[in-house]
Amino acid sequence: MVNPKGIRRGTRYMFARKFRKHGIEPLSTYYRIYRRGDIVDIKGNGAFQKGMPFKAYHGRTGRVFNVTKHAVGVLVNKRVRLLLCITLLALTLPLYVYVDIKGNGAFQKGMPFKAYHGRTDRVFSVTFCLRFQRASNKTLIYGTSILVPSSRIVLNRVIQKRINVRVEHVRPSKCRQDFLNRVKENEKKKKLARETGVIVPIRRMPAEPRKAHLVKTRYNKPQLLCPVRFEIIA
């Protein structure tokens, strides 16, 4: 197919199961206990079509906000782009022309938000309106909608999406495991410092460079590394 529009297009390898991991799903998947506030990783399993997340959420990490019998509700962060849609009457505009946005109180549908009133920007899409306006002389005037990327648009705005995913497509996340281990180690260091009276730094420090040392070449002769010469085989 050319330019498919399916909701799961391009997911042949995304939702495919790993090598030698086919077959019946282990019972540990269903025995896991999820609670509100838990952090989970979303990973679609192609063997189960029900409750499969949309491909945009595959591989993301979210927080559980609801637990049901066979699924969990997950809060996932998603970057969105806001678009401004304005409805005009009997107007044909070419693309990439500058227009002034001025709300008309006589037409409630397609009215821009008050923050965009009086702004100027460029048209990037022209579509037909889904309704007709009837004028006073009983004639139909076809409506047209234009899409304007307003200058007040917030690029890369992050909003929280609430999705419901079955338990086959989620698993507990290990993103906080290193942090929890470091907390336990710091508590041990603090306890030892209180007992001995020696101040122990608990701050993370970057890895230091290797210290100066002597390399012996008696049994470790230096080797010259260079790319292999290209040979043309006729």
Image (cartoon, helix red, strand yellow):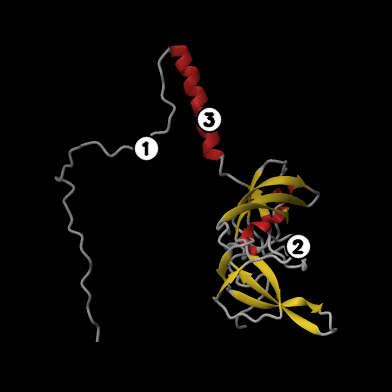
Lower sequence index among marks 1 and 3? 3
Residue 182, relative to residue 30: is it above or below?
A: above
Which of the pair 140/167 is nearer the observer?
A: 140
Question: Badge 1 is on which residue?
Answer: 206
Query: Tag 3's secondary structure?
Result: helix
Asked if marks 2 and 3 touch (Cβ < 8 Å), the reply is no
**Residue shown at 47% from the left, 22% from the top:** 189
Image coordinates of residue 203 in percent, x first then y, are: 43, 30
- When asked about the image quadrant of residue 104, the answer is bottom right
Q: Classify mark 3: residues with Cα within 10 Å, few (<14), some (14-19) or many (20+).
A: few
Residue 143, relative to residue 163: is it above or below?
A: below
As shown in the figure, which amino acid type bears the numbered disc 1? Pro
What's the mark number on residue 183? Answer: 3
What's the mark number on residue 50? Answer: 2
Q: CA distance from mark 1 to mark 2?
A: 46 Å
Query: Tag 1's secondary structure?
Result: loop
Image coordinates of residue 149 in percent, x first then y, are: 58, 66
**Residue shown at 71% from the left, 59% from the top:** 24
Image coordinates of residue 2 in percent, x first then y, are: 60, 83
Asked if marks 1 and 3 touch (Cβ < 8 Å), the reply is no
Lower sequence index among marks 1 and 2? 2
Q: Is residue 28 left or right of residue 149?
A: right
Image coordinates of residue 97 in percent, x first then y, are: 55, 76
Q: CA distance from mark 2 to mark 3?
A: 39 Å
Name the quadrant of the N terminus: bottom right
**Residue shown at 71% from the left, 61% from the top:** 52
Q: Is residue 167 left or right of residue 185?
A: right
- Please state which of the two labelled residues, at mark 1 or mark 2, is closer to the viewer: 1
Query: Tag 2's secondary structure?
Result: loop
As shown in the figure, which amino acid type bears the numbered disc 3? Val
Residue 31, relative to residue 185: is it above or below?
A: below
- When asked about the image quadrant of residue 124, the answer is bottom right
